[in-house]
């Protein structure tokens, strides 16, 4: 059964009447939410965001930040895992931060009948055979028309399809595993929801995140996260805050997995008394002048 995003967005089978306005993938401020259904049927979420530029070997990349929300809807501890760039030929290249080389991730210049072999060797083998582009359709999400590339067969590297400017149906990095069900849940451009896999369930369940401030990530928020650390974690009675960059902290609060405030502390506090909080998973929210910091806390 096709996802409701396909039904609501209307994939049109005609390739002759496609919109010639190309939607680049590598742009500032884009956000993806990826869902992973584990073998035990628990759902985990990965969050991705393109933010700020860097130069490597003379090439300009966007940094792809990742936050592993795991079993909660709150992203935390954003870290750079990949570098992305897009050339004038509509090809998207990925460079894992640990690697010296870049690898072709997407090619949005393909035509029906073309073959393509895109990979990078972090999760997937490099000896996968090329696949054939079997069909190119339109994806129309409330008037926003994009090309959709379909392949002769589903291979874990590719996903079921690629959507122009969005990426694979698995997620922006196409990470997939044979042991889990992986799919792109929702996607945003400049705070606007552009893609929602299942409008009835996903929009109400997790794609409503911008209304909770998920997308209120300022330009300095990633640096702020790096300047504030907590320990020990897991913690029993006392949780310590280390503010290595002397960031001006406004409020400190602990949230449960539903986003409800459990405890609040004075902004100058560096030792948080949590002995009376029940065992479980929480989030420490620290509001600063540069933006909010969200840290996952395990109370044991």
Image: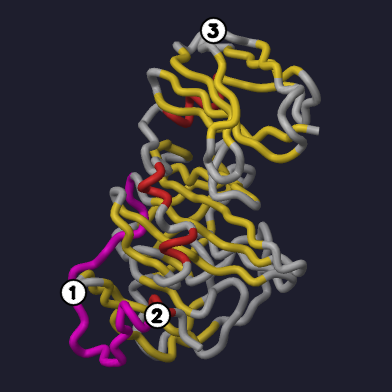
- Going by the image, does 278 lie left or right of 45? right
Q: Nearer the viewer, mark 1 or mark 3?
A: 3
Q: In which quarter of the image is residue 79?
A: top right
The circle drawn on residue 20 is 1
Residue topped by disc 2: 149
Q: How crowded is mark 1: few (under 14 residues within 10 Å), some or many (20 or more)?
A: few
Q: Could you tell whether 20 is left or right of 164 in the image?
A: left
**Residue 137 counted in the magenta span:** no
Q: What stretch is highlighted in magenta?
A: 6-28
Q: Nearer the viewer, residue 151 or 211?
A: 211
Q: SS of the residue at dot 1? A: loop
Asked if one can make out residue 179 in the rendered structure from this viewpoint, the answer is yes
Q: What element carries label 2?
A: strand
Q: Could you tell which of marks 1 and 3 lies nearer the N-terminus?
A: 1
150 vs 258: above or below: below
- Residue under label 3, please give it: 268
């Amino acid at each position: 059964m096709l996802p409701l995003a396909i039904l609501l967005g209307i994939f049109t089978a005609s390739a002759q009447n496609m919109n010639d306005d190309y939607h680049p993938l590598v742009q500032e401020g884009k956000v993806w939410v990826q869902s992973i259904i584990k073998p035990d049927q628990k759902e985990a979420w990965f969050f991705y965001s393109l933010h700020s530029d860097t130069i490597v070997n003379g090439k300009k990349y966007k940094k792809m930040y990742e936050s592993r929300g795991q079993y909660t809807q709150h992203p935390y501890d954003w870290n750079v895992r990949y570098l992305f760039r897009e050339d004038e030929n509509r090809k998207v290249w990925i460079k894992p931060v640990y690697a010296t080389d870049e690898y072709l991730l997407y090619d949005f210049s393909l035509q029906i009948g073309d073959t393509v072999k895109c990979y990078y060797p972090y999760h997937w083998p490099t000896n996968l055979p090329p696949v054939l582009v079997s069909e190119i359709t339109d994806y129309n999400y409330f008037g926003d028309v994009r090309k959709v590339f379909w392949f002769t067969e589903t291979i874990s590297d590719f996903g079921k399809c690629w959507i122009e400017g969005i990426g694979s149906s698995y997620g922006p990095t196409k990470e997939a595993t044979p042991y889990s069900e992986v799919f792109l849940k929702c996607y945003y451009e400049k705070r606007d929801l552009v893609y929602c896999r299942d409008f009835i369930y996903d929009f109400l369940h997790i794609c409503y995140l911008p209304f909770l401030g998920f997308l209120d990530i300022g330009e300095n928020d990633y640096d702020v996260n790096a300047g504030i650390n907590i320990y020990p974690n897991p913690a029993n009675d006392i949780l310590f805050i280390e503010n290595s960059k002397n960031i001006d902290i406004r409020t400190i609060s602990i949230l449960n997995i539903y986003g409800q405030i459990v405890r609040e502390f004075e902004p100058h506090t560096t030792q948080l008394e949590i002995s009376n909080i029940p065992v479980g998973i929480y989030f420490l929210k620290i509001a600063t002048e540069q933006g909010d910091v969200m840290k996952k806390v395990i109370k044991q």
